[in-house]
Amino acid sequence: MLEIKNLHAGIDGNEILKGINLTIKKGEIHAIMGPNGSGKSTLAKVLAGHPSYEVTKGEVLFEGKNLLELAPDERAREGIFMAFQYPIEVPGVSNAQFLRLAYNEKRKHLGEEELDPLEFKDLLKERAKVVEMDASFMSRSVNEGFSGGEKKRNEILQMAVLEPKLAVLDETDSGLDIDALRIVAGGVNQLHNPENAVILVTHYQRLLDYIVPQFVHVLANGRIAKEGGKELALELEEKGYDWLKTAADTGTLGVQAS
Amino acid sequence: MVTEITTRNNSYREAYQVLQERTAPSGASWLQRLRANAFERFEELGFPSVRDEEWKYTNVAAIAKADFQKGVYAESSSRGSGAKELASFGSPETEASQLIFVNGKLRSDLSSVSGLPAEVVALDLSQAIQDERYSEIVRTNLARHADYIANGFTALNTAFISDGAFVYIPKGVVVETPIQLLFISDGAGVNAASFPRVLLVAAENSSATLIESYVSTHDSAYFTNAVVEVALKSGARLEHYKVQRESQAAFHVATTQADLGPNSTYDSTTITFGARLSRHDFSVTMDHEGVECWVDGLYLVTDDQHTDTHSVIDHRQPHCTSHQLYKGILDGKSRAVFNGKVFVRHDAQKTDAMQTNKNLLLSNEARVDTKPQLEILADDVKCAHGAAVGQIDEDELFYLATRGIHPDLARNLLTYGFAEEVIGKIKVDSIRAQLDAAVLNRLNARLEA
Ligand SMILES: Nc1ncnc2c1ncn2[C@@H]1O[C@H](COP(=O)(O)OP(=O)(O)OP(=O)(O)O)[C@@H](O)[C@H]1O
Ligand SMILES: [Mg+2]
């Protein structure tokens, strides 16, 4: 589904991603972990097509297509979704209005009929159950005045409505209380199926108890410093990142840094 | 050029004399004198020029030069547009609580106030002056709030006082139904000028909603010069909406003066969409304690439109609160001027004043001159003001893009959201829906629901 090959990217001439290689097949769940500033959000934003980041080397294929050629909205309509680490507020635009617009853009792209406000209301009601979100949030402006946890939950609601092929969830767990974490993780599990894939960016093993990844990748200093199965997350929880950081810098882990 | 302007003024002089002569036999002598004084003042002042600091960015020479004829409509008060078409500008909420004026003249066949409580008064100003039940209230209020000494346009309007609206909410009366004053220009008179005049007096502890609307049936050039006086007595509450949707070729000049009594509440929202050139002088005076007011607005202009808001919020007594949020959306080569003065006088301790002007530029050729001014003479006050001029936020745009929304649509959505902060506070559903639709129409978007 997604193939990242030797991806280098940065901002204003500063290289942040220094050769990422990652392959994701449909039905898989991958976790990306790593210390603050290692480039996790940058990777997510580059995949989503943030205009501030410049890709200097490498390629990204999504279902065989060159993803880097597509504008952010085209990527989204192709089925890529990013849940933001810091969701943006959109004053004056109601959640329902926003979601219907986004949903219909996707329907149009697929050559399907658009839903009218009433039809969409029913759909939204159904999808809101996935994250147990109260109806009162639908008429409020997108994320405006939402608590940190509510914003994160709203991201997953958007995912539930848009049903992406590939969801990149950037620290969706941080800021969630214990109950909300359970609900949101449950939602992601409901939405996950053999036809789609999920990338979880997280700092905490706790999330991975709920959403169990097949693969864990550790990012350090813009490179993948270590990869493994779900047990790698437990190891990190125990040992921290220090041993990896030094290893990644000196290249002693044997992960290629081309 | 001077002679040319003089000639035009002469056509106002003629119309003025005709009015004075026509009304002399039956008219109130105080009104004859008021008109005479105001006309004299107009002749002294003339129309303002850009040399005048308050008119620096707004050149009204076109109004002075154009052959706008006050009075041409008086006879033609045309049946040019069908009653049905005209009535369609009304709102469902005000079907039985509206006065409709066509080219400045009250059309009683289209108006109805049967839905208002019997003790509430809403009628033609000239009738109110004749009616002994109201003549005293009118005499003691008319032109006592809006000063015609300083402003040539106000003087001109005052010199022509005859048609207009008088609204009176008696003591303790709470009017749930909004009252609409609808001023329609129907393009029947070429270069017609109309000078709407409104006097609203809200007695002690009364409560009401006033909608003041300006629309046109044709895209013709005409000149509206309105003066609205609002007097709130102790504990009175008024929600005041001004919706200016004149033709794109029109000139719209207006003065609004609100004098707010003790513990009164005044919540105003001014929407400016229309006119080639519009200017609003809005003055709110708090010469009593315990007043709270909102002086909010939205201007949405494009092409060659020019809009100018000059507001004065005057805190003269302690314990008053004022909120002002004016937002502007500018496209094309349009231009907006916002000049907002907030005065906190020496005695006005414990004033709480908040003023914001935010502008969104959708084109590189649009331009805003914004000048929020805070003048504080008291020492125990809470005041803040600010102005911003910006473009659509790139992070917001990216966020919408990641949800599959095309950048053009995303821009429209964000612009719509920007306008919503003001439009969303309008409590009359049909007016809010109408404005939402108008914003969307301007943006060519489709975001219903
Ligand atoms: N817009 C930017 N301008 C300058 N530097 C940036 C920008 N975006 C990212 N960086 C830098 O790139 C590096 C990687 O940032 P990124 O946000 O990808 O880290 P992260 O792994 O997501 O960290 P965290 O765990 O704290 O979320 C950091 O050093 C950061 O300061
Ligand atoms: Mg991050």
Image (cartoon, coloured by chain):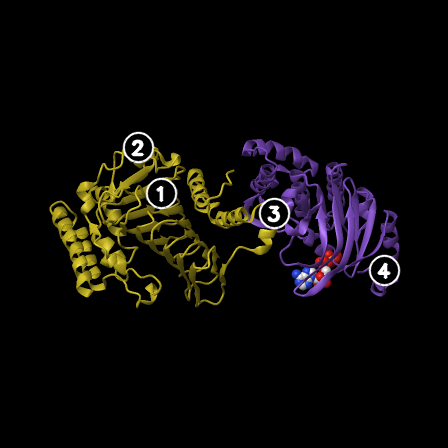
Which of discs 3 and 2 lies nearer the camera? The answer is 3
Determine the secondary structure under disc 2. Answer: helix
Of the residues shown, which amino acid type is indicated by label 1? Lys
Q: Tell me how far mark 1 sits from mark 3, CA to CA.
A: 58 Å
Q: Tell me how far mark 2 sits from mark 4, CA to CA.
A: 79 Å
Q: Tell me how far mark 1 sits from mark 2, CA to CA.
A: 36 Å
Q: Chain of mark 4?
A: A
Residue B84 has which mark? 2
Which of discs 1 and 4 lies nearer the camera? The answer is 4
Of the residues shown, which amino acid type is indicated by label 4? Leu
Of the residues shown, which amino acid type is indicated by label 2? Lys
Determine the secondary structure under disc 1. Answer: loop
* Residue occupying image coordinates x 24% and y 58%: B64
Q: Between B359 and B342, which is closer to the camera in this rendering?
A: B359
Q: Tell me how far mark 4 sits from mark 3, CA to CA.
A: 36 Å
Same subunit, labels 1 and 4: the answer reads no
Q: Earlier in the sequence, mark 4 or mark 3?
A: 3
Q: Colour of chain B?
A: yellow
Neighbourhood count class around disc 4 (C-alpha, 10 Å): few under 14, some 14–19, many 20 upward = many
Same subunit, labels 3 and 2: the answer reads no
Neighbourhood count class around disc 1 (C-alpha, 10 Å): few under 14, some 14–19, many 20 upward = some
Determine the secondary structure under disc 4. Answer: helix
Q: Chain of mark 3?
A: A
Determine the secondary structure under disc 3. Answer: helix
Identify the residue under disc 4. Answer: A244
